[in-house]
Amino acid sequence: MSAVETFERIIRHQSSKELVPFLLELPKADVIPVRHHTVKLKKELEAVVQLKANTWGSRITQPQSMMLFLSGLRTFSRKEALNNNFMGWWADLTKEPYFWQILEHTRPDWTLDWLQRWSSGNQWYRPSYRLLRQLEDRQLIPYDAKLFSASVPGVLSDICQPLCEVEPVPAQAGKVVARELSLDPVLLTRDFPLVFDFDSSIDFQNGSVQLTMDKKRWKSKEPLNWQTWEKMHPRQLITWLDIIGDLAETGHLDRADLLTRSLLALRRDFRRPLLTWFKNVFLTLKPTAAERLARQSELVELLAHPLPLVVNFALDQLKDLWAHSDFTPAPLLLYAEGLMTRQDLKTALRALLGAFDKLLKREPTLAPTLARLASSGLANADAGVQERAAKLLAGILGAKKPVLTSDEATEVTDTIGLYADLLTAAARTTLTPFLAVAPAAEFGEGGTASAYAPLNGFAPDISRATAIEPVQDWHELLFLTGQVVQHYEPAAVERWLDGLLRLHGQFPAGYAQQLRPYVQQALPWELKGKTEAEVTDILFRYSFDNSRNGQQQMLLALLMSWVLGFAQAKLPEVVLVSKHYNSPDPLLHLEKQRLTVVEARLREAASPLPLLSTPSHAPHWVAPSVLLGKLLTYEAAGHTPDPADLALALARTAWQAENDAATARQLLPQVQHPELSKLLSWLLAPADAVLPLTVPAVAGKSLVQVVAKTITRLSPFRQPAAVGPLTEAWPWLWAVAARTRQPNGTVAELRVLADYPGLAEPWSPGWQFEQKSNTYEQSWNKEKPVVTYTWQELCVVPEHPGQTPPSPLLLYSLHARLPQNKRSYLWSLLPDLSFLLTLLPNNPAPLHWHLVRSAFNTDNSGSESRDAMQKFLHPLLAPGPRFDESTTLLFALGLVHYAPMCRALALEVLLSSIDTARLEPAALGDALGQLLAAEYAPVQRLTDVLAQARAISPTTDDALRQLLDALLPGLPAVPLRNTRKLIEAYADLQGRTRQPVPAAVQQQLRQWSSSATLKKAAASLVSA
Amino acid sequence: MSDFAYAYARPSALEARPEGNALLLSAFAEEQTTTDSSCFFWGRLRDSWLAARGLSTLAKVVASRFVPQSAALRDPIVTAGAGQLRFEAFSSCNGVYARLDLNSEALDGEFLSSGTTNVDFNEPMVNALARIARTEPVILSVGEKEVTLERAAGKVTERKVALPERWIKGLTSVQAYLALMEEKLRLTRVQAVQLVQSLPAGTAKADYFLVLRGPRPSFAPVGSPGAVRVGGVHRLRLLEGLLPLCEAVRVFATPDGQASAFVLELGGGQRFLLALSADVWRGFSGEGNQLDTLMEELPAEWVAGANRLFQGNEVFNPSLFALENSLAPDTVDRLCASLSAMGLLGFDLADNQHFYRRLPFKLGRILSLNPRLKNARALLEAADDVQLVGVGAAGCTEARVRGTGVWHTVLVGGPEKPRCTCPWFSGHQGQRGPCKHILAAQMRFA
């Protein structure tokens, strides 16, 4: 039998007793084969396999593990030994005679490296300190400071473990452990101090003493479980901090050395918890003032640390030493130079500036240095720091007996003047005597600021500058497909759809091959490594059933259809139904209809007609003349427009662009279809010549029949109806045209169609706050067994859920009475929101109200609300009509949104809407007032935004003043937190705009004057 | 990536001497100096306090990282030459590049040799920098002036660190970006302080744009005409300590907004530059902005000749250089790109000129440090991986290039920018340099 066979037999069927003699006598020539076989057997036995039904595990036994470990020690080279899998953590090796026997015999040259790797591999299973000491004593390894330091923290639990086995456990186990440790001078003098030099786990490795749970020891009648055991035998937690305190008290550890070492360790860039532990070591020892004075240079050195934790600690230790005669201020002042410009320190800087006050009293000669440092403090953004710095400067500059030379004083005053614009109100007041007088008016000519007035009418820019370039050739279409697949940007999608239709006859032969990379990008997992035939098969069989279907899936279906040469219509496979709290937005049904039309035309015609709803001008307008041109082409080709496409085209028509509308009106006589001609004549009529609206009867049906059919459609259980043919769609297209042109007016002529929001009357819901609460019991908390949370919920009212609109074409009514829970629409709304917002440029209010109730019913509605807000705010940056009520409310929600990014974006919208005169300041102020009064969001968020918008231009200031004029009276008489900041911002704006304070604001300010915190701020405005 | 062992004769230190403090920066150069001296500069810092602030900020940059990865502390490199000392460093993530320039106005001493070296920035030395007082005289030594016998006997401070092939790649991209940059804004000292205060709280996940609103600099989340795109704006907090000390800040950006740079005019001949990549997750080392120019291989002797010439000149303006030597501007661009791909060139925004770094002249680095270029050449080596489909109007060439499991359509030549159907191009639209498919098609057909 060969050595390898013998070895395998021993491992499989025998024990260490037989293995050890075998290994000790192993000839040199057999070492390598046995080594290889050790690795092989280890792999085989440790592999996780099914042991029995529903049970998985490895087949190795503990004796086998030990045997393979011993074999490794004997035969492994450095390469195998330093493998991750070779460790001895599962046994106390110090008590294994075979381990020592093999190791003494083999003495591998990799022992130290092996232990180092083991030690660094897992912080919970490091080689024990006792093991290392024995290895060192037997001269199996040299002393290695880092290795030993890493094992020191585990000593505590090693000592605690035997104490848990003997009944009764010591009452004061900590003292017993400390006594045990004190018996090992090598540990205390050589190895323990290493924890201050290396990153060890001493901050979280503690010990505990508790009698080990055992049935035999259980004498109570209560059932035995860990809770009852814990009650009977309470656990004693023993921390290194307690032990260090005890050992320092008994003199086994040098207290002075510990204090110095902990300060030196705090200088390092260790982990934050470890730095906290060093800080706690210092605090545990409760150093006296004399001891801290003796270490003032070490403490001052800590001021250079990047972590505020350490700097704050150092200043805390120094704060009662400032006035001491033995304290040397020079090093502190050197470090202070670097601290004053740090924006992450607030508490520390306030403490430091307080210290400067004391130092100044002790040593007036330090005044020039302290004044310079305090001047630097003025640049800090924190109001408290600025206020302290200002007080110090005012004290120095206003001292009865001058402490600065005139040159020094001038330099300091100049510096203050430099920072004047950065000062908070309080700091500015303190330093007023030293600031140069500001010019009478900062903006505007002749000292008067420009007044802000909102826009009266809006006409989209329909010109060559905003015209959207159609896709020119195949290559442009090909690479645009990449952009659509990767970025899914609405404008690119519209161009792509248009390009697909326009260039249909120009696709090169084998174009599907060129599209393949994009299909692969869209379906990376499904198509990875697939052959051509497999890809085609997958695309044919691809199912959209499991997706949250939206526009992206519809575009993917169209791409697939394209790649397959339009052999199979894929769009109908994309099903839009409500499931699992996910209801598709009703506008998506129209988009699906529109894309289905695209797919059908591409399948049927060599030169398909373009979509009517494709935007012709940026951002998403359809120019009236372009619409007319396309309709004439349709008529020339004998083609009837698709109702969904026509409805979306009407909604996007820039009817207010007077010049282009006039051009379109000239083409109207050429339109053959009488109903279309009539409808467009009404929509594109000049502003001063609006025609009467005439709702037609559908061909072959009376108006009564239409209404009767409509009533049956109002059932809440109906699925959205399919878009019918054009002949049936005219009444609804008239309704769309009417609401496109008159978003807010009453159109009595539509009353005969149905009594539904968005028809005769616009859907203009209100909004209010409802207090909601949630109560739960916590029986374990005796002091507070019941907890009730209350919050304000923003509700859009009234709600009439579950009435399907009379026609899916009614774009402005679809969101009014949705059948599902309002939150269930958010998931599908989010990915498509940017696109949906492009559909209704003339009347976005219905979509906005839907967004308010779906995403913003509470302040912190999660990341969905944040993403929705960003998508809503972006389009508002462009010129457009004056904000209506729904837009203003959403915008107000953005200004006080919990996400800083949304507030930053809302600030941009605020500034741009003032520039483009879209903002309605009074309405916004009113909405914000209601939001703040209901404590939907804190005042601070708004004041932060206002601070960034101040003093940009006279018009901006005036618009903000108007906003606050409306906002302040809406706030409660009992002031909210940070109302003072709001009043200060208002005072600042009043100072710039020099407008009278309205009576309503005066009254509110008078009420607030009774509050101590607001008295000063409000008084100046009331008297003005 | 190869590991590179620094062997410093002793650690850098700030030593107290009777004549004042001495900041002794221990150096280790990959390329040997031209003179026997191992010391590059020895002399007095005219404003030691300010220089110490600059060096501390540089140390902060080196220690910083903005993506979840372990910090590997590198040592800055110093280039001495043309009467200037330039300390350069990258953050661990390679997305931030910082440089402290000390010119003759800031230094009162002797340049003993020209060259580029790593200097040891150890923790005690960096801590000691914070202790330098405003009026304290400080001697600066880069390298050791006295080569003594003690050195042989003394302990060599050796640290094993993964070097800087990434840095060399980063240096290549940074200089290419810097050379393209235009000045967008100039801020006063107070505006600089306002800049710090207007930094958005927390970690910025989206782009911000620096604009002037009235007199105030602000960071807006949307772009506008004249605004400077600053990706990962929180990285600017590295400058918090230095901005309030500067006389003015000049803000530069590339025309396509792919990188921005803040030049702090500290006064007294000191200048601090901080360049930021387009996004936090984009290290300068991964940018391919030089690939277009590197595509066409120049004869090795040309590159070697240019290396010798620039080495002598130390600083030069490429346009003037082209005029003076009757060379076509694009030839000079390609020469600069080739040298820069070995990390040999840097760019000085304030003076609008290149400067030379004396690093080893290794032509092999051009390919090894540009994997996209290497992969493009590999595509060309295969018989049919790059195929011509046709030549269209205005010289626009369509090619088929083999990708992973698919063939990509590539369009090169003609008036429009090259395009490809691969995910890299679809995702970045050419903003991070061309993909390997475009490079291969360009090398074969353009």
Image (spheres, grey):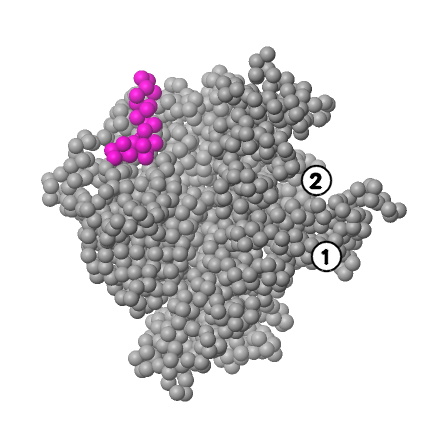
Q: A984 or B150, which is in the foreground?
A: B150
Q: Does the residue at mark 1 contact the one at mark 2 (Cβ under 8 Å)? A: no
Image coordinates for residue A525, horizontal then vertical, percent: 52, 27
In the image, A731 versus B220, the foreground residue is B220
Query: Which element is circle 1 on?
Result: loop
What range of the chain is rendered magenta? B362-385
Q: Residue at x 40, y 59 (%)?
A: B127
Q: Which mark is residue A172?
A: 1
| Closer-to-camera residue (B349/A463) | B349
Name the residue at 62% across, 55% down: A182
Chain of the residue where label 1 is placed in the rendered structure: A
Taking the magenta stretch, the answer to whether it contains residue A631 is no
Name the side, left or right, on which B88 lies relative to A513.
left
Q: Is residue A85 visible?
A: no
Of residues A892 and A966, which is closer to you in this image?
A892
Q: Is residue A493 left or right of residue B313?
A: right
Residue A957, picture quadrant: bottom left
> In terms of secondary structure, what is the magenta stretch mainly?
helix
Quadrant in the picture for residue A949: bottom left
Give the foreground label among 1 and 2: 1
Residue for badge 2: A716
Mark 1 or mark 2: name the one nearer the start of the chain: 1
